[in-house]
Image (tube, rainbow, N blue to C red):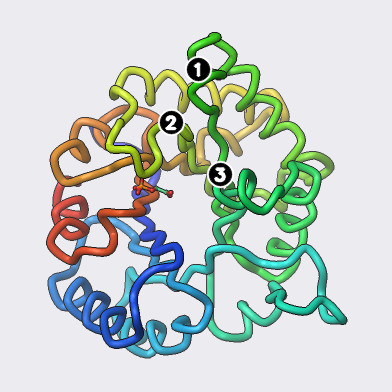
């Protein structure tokens, strides 16, 4: 079925790869293109300018960051401001990834401030949400994800969210090899869209791209990506290997 939303496949490298490995990986993916999707690379901050050079003249490829500060300039040692990312040609930023939430204690309120900072600096936020295994097993996944969205998007008007991307990533599927079944993922994506519609009645919900993340591989990509409300993928482990990542891109 054709969808009105153009797919986005985003590579979340996390804290992996040395510089030359990163260069080779991006070059090989870019050279194998074009693809039927927008492709975003989210390397560690240090590699952003170099990855940007490699993708520069190829349309359809975008630079993303894995995080940004909720503050603008100032005395915030170790932080990177949204303004700096924009200034270095970054166009998207992953926010609220479950690793940021669980390892670095990022709260929904904090993520909300980051979202506002990102949007204020023309970055497209890829807002992550998802339940853990205990929450899924106790049938609280909808409640948990609904609450994350409500808090993270609080106070942000629909016109500022025009380019928002949401990534549904069940925590129990991230890096575990367990993937949500297509019907489980589709059900949550439809739920997320209905929540957006509830927060902002109008065209926003139907135009928002909702990515699935959690052990996406070439073997399971097609069945996930063909679901009505799945508009792409946020890929961790499989984005570190050119064959695996292009295999996912070719599944579209
Ligand atoms: P995974 O990671 O593909 O390795 O499960 C996805 C993510 O963390 O974004």
Q: Residue at x 21, y 45 (%)?
A: 217
State the image quarter where residue 129 is shown: top right
Tell me which label, 1 or 2, sits earlier in the chain.
Answer: 1
Q: Is residue 97 visible?
A: yes
Q: Residue at x 50, y 17 (%)?
A: 136
Q: Residues within 10 Å of mark 3 (few under 14, many from 20)?
A: many
Report if the CB atoms under discs 1 and 2 are less than 8 Å apart.
Answer: yes
Q: Which residue is mark 1?
A: 136
Q: Is residue 133 left or right of residue 25?
A: right
Say if disc 2 is inside 8 Å of ligand 1. Answer: no
Q: Which residue is mark 3?
A: 98
Mark 1 to mark 2 CA distance (whole Å): 9 Å
Mark 2 to mark 3 CA distance (whole Å): 10 Å
Vertical comparison of 251 with 38: above or below: above
Vertical comparison of 5 with 59: above or below: above
Q: Which residue is mark 2?
A: 172
Locate the N terminus by quadrant.
Answer: top left
Between 210 and 205, the residue placed more toward the observer is: 210
Q: Position of residue 112 (x, y in %)?
A: 76, 48
Say if disc 3 is inside 8 Å of ligand 1. Answer: yes
Q: Residue at x 71, y 77 (%)?
A: 78
Q: Position of residue 158 (x, y in %)?
A: 72, 43
């Amino acid at each position: 079925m054709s969808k009105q939303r153009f797919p986005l496949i985003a590579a979340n490298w996390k804290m992996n790869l040395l510089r030359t490995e990163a260069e080779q990986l991006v070059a090989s993916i870019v050279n194998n293109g074009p693809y039927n999707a927008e492709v975003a690379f989210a390397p560690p901050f240090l590699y952003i300018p170099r990855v940007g050079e490699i993708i520069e003249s190829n349309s359809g490829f975008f630079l993303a960051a894995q995080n940004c500060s909720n503050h603008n300039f100032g005395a915030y040692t170790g932080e990177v401001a949204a303004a700096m990312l924009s200034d270095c040609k970054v166009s998207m930023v992953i926010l609220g990834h479950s690793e940021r939430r669980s390892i670095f204690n990022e709260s929904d309120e904090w993520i909300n401030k980051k979202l506002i900072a990102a949007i204020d600096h023309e970055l497209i936020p890829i807002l992550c949400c998802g339940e853990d295994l205990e929450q899924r097993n106790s049938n609280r996944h909808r409640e948990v994800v609904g609450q994350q969205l409500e808090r993270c998007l609080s106070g942000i008007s629909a016109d500022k969210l025009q380019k928002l991307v949401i990534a549904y990533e069940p925590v129990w599927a991230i890096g575990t090899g367990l993937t949500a079944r297509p019907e489980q993922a589709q059900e949550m994506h439809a739920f997320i869209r209905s929540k957006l519609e509830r927060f902002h009645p109008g065209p926003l919900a139907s135009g928002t791209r909702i990515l699935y993340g959690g052990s996406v591989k070439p073997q399971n990509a097609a069945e996930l990506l063909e679901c009505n409300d799945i508009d792409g993928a946020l890929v961790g482990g499989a984005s570190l290997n050119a064959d695996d990542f292009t295999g996912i891109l070719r599944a579209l």
